Amino acid sequence: MSADSHYRNPVVPGFYPDPSVCRVGADYYLVCSSFEYFPGVPLLHSRDLVNWRQIGNVLDRPSQLELPADTPASQGVYAPTIRHHDGRFWVVTTNVSLGRHLIVTARDPAGPWSDPVYLDLPHVDPSLAWDDEGNCWLTTSGVKSYRIDPDTGRVLEGPIPLWSGTGGQYPEAPHLYRIDGWWYLLLSEGGTHTGHAVSIARSRSPRGPFEPASTNPILTHRGSNLPVQATGHADLVQAPDGGWWMVLLGIRAKGQWPPYHVLGRETFLVPVRWVDGWPVVDPAEEVTAAPAGSVPALAAPAEAGAYRDDFDAAVLAPGWVSPRSRPDAAWSLTARPGWLTLNATGTTLDRAGATIVATRQRHHDCRASARLDPGGGTAGLTIRIDEAHHYDLEVSASRVRVVGRVGPFRQVFAELAVPPGPLVLTIATRTHDLRPPTVTCAADLSPGAAPFGVRAAACDMVAFEVQTSDGPRVLAELDGRYLSTEVAAGFTGRVVGMYVTEGSAAFDWLDYRPAG
């Protein structure tokens, strides 16, 4: 097969799970789950299904996204679906913190999106489809369907039981499609980890009965040694050339047994071919074969995914997220032009309510650097999964320290005096090479502290660096397993970003780039 018929997966790396896609003309639009982060439901655009750029967030204001202050990690917004119908884009999702589904619409996918129409129905993973008579069908996990008025949220018919898969646990992520006179019902089952699978059935009516494919599951990596695992939560889209594609989530775990994944569930792409009226899907691999000429070659350059924000724009870029909310009083781009000023709203990263502005970690090996003027405050860089699992590079009272919180334990691993004024901080991650254990804490910087060792099972190492007059200095290097889903649990991945827990601090820039 020629070189131009391969592309690299994941097509959207990092914490972008539960993908849903639609096409309008030559343009593709994709949305993902955002859970407890604000703004919610990232929206990405592509012309080729391989190269994606985030152009906004569907739920970008408090009137659309209510996340109570006590929203637990991995609650909030689950599994959106995006569709285009009758000149409008439609997104339906579930705010599990409120126990409600919601529908928002827009003429332009870049926004603004409407305020929500709510539906008080059970389950999660809602999806929309329209039949030839103009009826709108809402399907949910379970798997059940309702005929609704999407403009008011009124239920006109249902619930109608459909087909709940082949017997795997948690039948979810159902999508209905009208293709060649059939209604196809695509769903996931087996749970959103290594048992995950995609199955399909069809009927002549959206009400059923549905006949399952004899080849189910049509996609699963369970029981395999493939580097991509937990494949599922899929959606189908047809390209302008008539070809079909599937987006789905997967994980890339690292380290010895058991492996750990730290980037969360990512978005993958696989081609689909139809045989005797059923879709046939090949495995999702990091280098995936595609029909020749159907997608561009993607020999990912070393700097692919690099990002720098100098905070010169009038608004924050759409890739910045904050846990639960981002009050206007917590941040400013005008208080010190060309800088992002953060104001403390909470006194610790160990509890909800602190001021954090972060971006998703999108590469296993990466460097995130920021120039920080702490003023008289306490501020720094954090790499986190939740309030109980984070590592921080923190500046306060002319000292910089490395702080780790894992479950009930909190420890200062290293500390160094620094001159007052701006300084550059860096958090870097690198895939662990499984060599024998090494000392990973500069004990001489933390009097009385024992070296922090790492076993060969580590998936990656996280280094903490400060720029000094003598050059960069690594204060500590910590085991990345403790910031993984397998340790922290939940549905999200790591984010890395800026925070303040006392007073105010200003950030001149943040630079994120892959390393290695």
Image: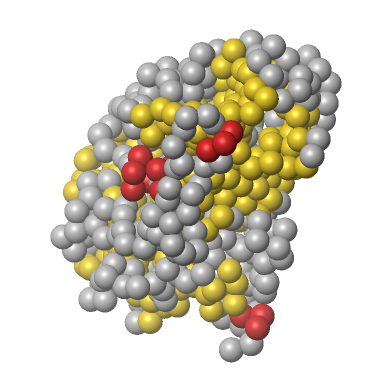
Residue at position x 65%, y 48% in the image: 367
Q: Quadrant of the N terminus?
A: bottom right
* Position of residue 291 in the picture relative to residue 177 (left or right): right
Looking at the rendered structure, the number of numbered marks drawn on it comes to: 0
Query: For the view shown, which residue lies furthest in the left direction?
Result: 167
Q: Is residue 434 visible?
A: yes
Q: Is residue 110 above or below residue 174?
A: above
Image quarter of residue 2? bottom right
Residue at position x 42%, y 20% in the image: 351
Q: Position of residue 235 (x, y in %)?
A: 43, 58
Q: Position of residue 416 (x, y in %)?
A: 64, 29
Residue at position x 57%, y 50% in the image: 429
Q: Is residue 205 visible?
A: no
Residue at position x 23%, y 76% in the image: 214
Q: Quadrant of the C terminus?
A: bottom right
* Position of residue 392 in the picture relative to residue 261 (left or right): right
